[in-house]
């Protein structure tokens, strides 16, 4: 069975590249090929222009499960990975201090892994993948199942690594918020094929022609008629009125007009005192993802 087909992408230095897709799309297969757990049946992979089979390139990899040793302490793990990546003995202490602070795990330095929380274990696992700034870093669902506080620390850690280390990062996640926060570019994998690629903003602009409009008004009937009535300014658009609460109304509008034009229309509505206030935003990256998954089904 062919799991992935015609998959081509490159990841630049200092770039975080998001590989997104539903379960079973082929993301794990791609990762396993990159780290040489699976053999290619066709195609090539290059690291800095060198065939990956001939490259001695070190890859930092953090899988979905934490690969740690219960009886070793946090600092034992860091020392081990620093030495594996070529750091000299006289620099180990300074580097360890740096990385412990980077991941905000100072209070756990001398604890055995079996005695630390799941969030701290995950921070340590990700830290081990980025230690000594390998040129390629692969993070498989880095924040799945952890608390919001630990998630923010991990996001900050990934951002700092991308900025400082000249690494190329590939990340997979089911959190569209995470993808938008961390990724410079994103591709979506459906049934083993890439269906789109670009920055989060580009993908939203290209594949999601809907906006979320929230208005506060005591003249809703007049406002609605001016906008969506037979002769209304947005009469040609499709819309859905989602909820109403304390004179606030939320519309999802599908339209080909630019967001600038809609802002102008809303300012006209405000000047006519049909509305007291409004917010207008483009639909989310999650909506883009859902649309591609729907097409698959």
Image (cartoon, rainbow, N blue to C red):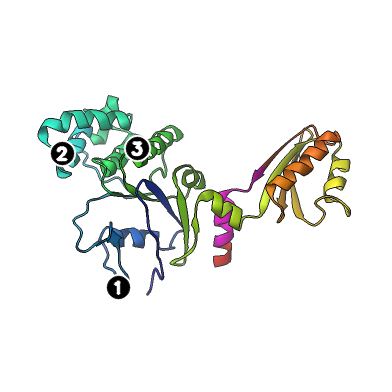
User: Cα distance, mark 1 to mark 2?
Assistant: 36 Å
Picture quarter containing residue 40?
A: bottom left
Question: Could you tell me residue 133's position as x and y percent?
Answer: 26, 42
Numbered badge on residue 41: 1
Q: Is residue 10 left or right of residue 88?
A: right
Q: Earlier in the sequence, mark 3 or mark 2?
A: 2
Q: Quadrant of the N terminus?
A: bottom left
Q: Quadrant of the C terminus?
A: bottom right
Identify which residue, 121 or 238, lies in the foreground: 238
Res. 139 in view: no
Please name the residue that numbered disc 3 is placed on. 118
Bin the neighbour count of mark 2 within 10 Å (Cα to Cα): few under 14, some 14-19, many 20 and up.
some
Question: Could you tell me residue 219's position as x and y percent?
Answer: 86, 36
Question: In this picture, is 208 found above or below 243?
Answer: below
Picture quarter containing residue 44?
A: bottom left
Look at 40% across and 61% down and name the residue there. 9
Question: Could you tell me residue 267's position as x and y percent?
Answer: 78, 38
Q: Earlier in the sequence, mark 3 or mark 1?
A: 1
User: Cα distance, mark 3 to mark 1?
Assistant: 37 Å
Please name the residue that numbered disc 2 is placed on. 87
């Amino acid at each position: 069975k062919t799991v992935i087909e015609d998959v081509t992408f490159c990841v630049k230095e200092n770039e975080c590249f998001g590989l997104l897709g539903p379960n079973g799309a082929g993301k794990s297969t791609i990762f396993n090929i990159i780290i040489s757990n699976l053999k290619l049946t066709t195609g090539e992979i290059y690291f800095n222009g060198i065939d990956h089979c001939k490259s001695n390139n070190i890859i930092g990899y953090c899988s979905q499960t934490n690969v740690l040793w219960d009886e070793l302490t946090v600092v034992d793990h860091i020392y081990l990975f620093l030495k594996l990546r070529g750091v000299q003995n006289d620099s180990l202490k300074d580097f360890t201090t740096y990385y412990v602070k980077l991941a905000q795990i100072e209070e756990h330095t001398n604890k055995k892994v079996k005695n630390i929380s799941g969030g701290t274990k995950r921070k340590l696992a990700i830290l081990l993948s980025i230690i000594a700034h390998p040129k390629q870093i692969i993070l498989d669902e880095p924040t799945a199942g952890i608390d919001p506080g630990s998630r923010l620390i991990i996001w900050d850690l990934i951002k700092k690594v991308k900025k400082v280390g000249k690494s190329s990062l590939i990340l997979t996640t089911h959190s569209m918020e995470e993808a938008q926060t961390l990724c410079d570019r994103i591709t979506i994998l459906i049934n083993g094929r890439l269906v789109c690629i670009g920055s989060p903003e580009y993908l939203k602009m290209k594949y999601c022609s809907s906006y979320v409009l929230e208005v506060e008004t005591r003249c809703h009937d007049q406002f609605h008629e001016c906008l969506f009535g037979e002769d209304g300014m947005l009469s040609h658009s499709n819309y859905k009125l989602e909820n109403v609460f304390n004179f606030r109304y939320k519309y999802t509008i599908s339209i080909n007009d630019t967001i600038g034009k809609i802002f102008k229309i809303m300012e006209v509505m405000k000047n006519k005192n049909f509305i007291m206030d409004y917010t207008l935003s483009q639909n989310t990256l999650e909506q883009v993802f859902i649309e591609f998954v729907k097409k698959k089904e």
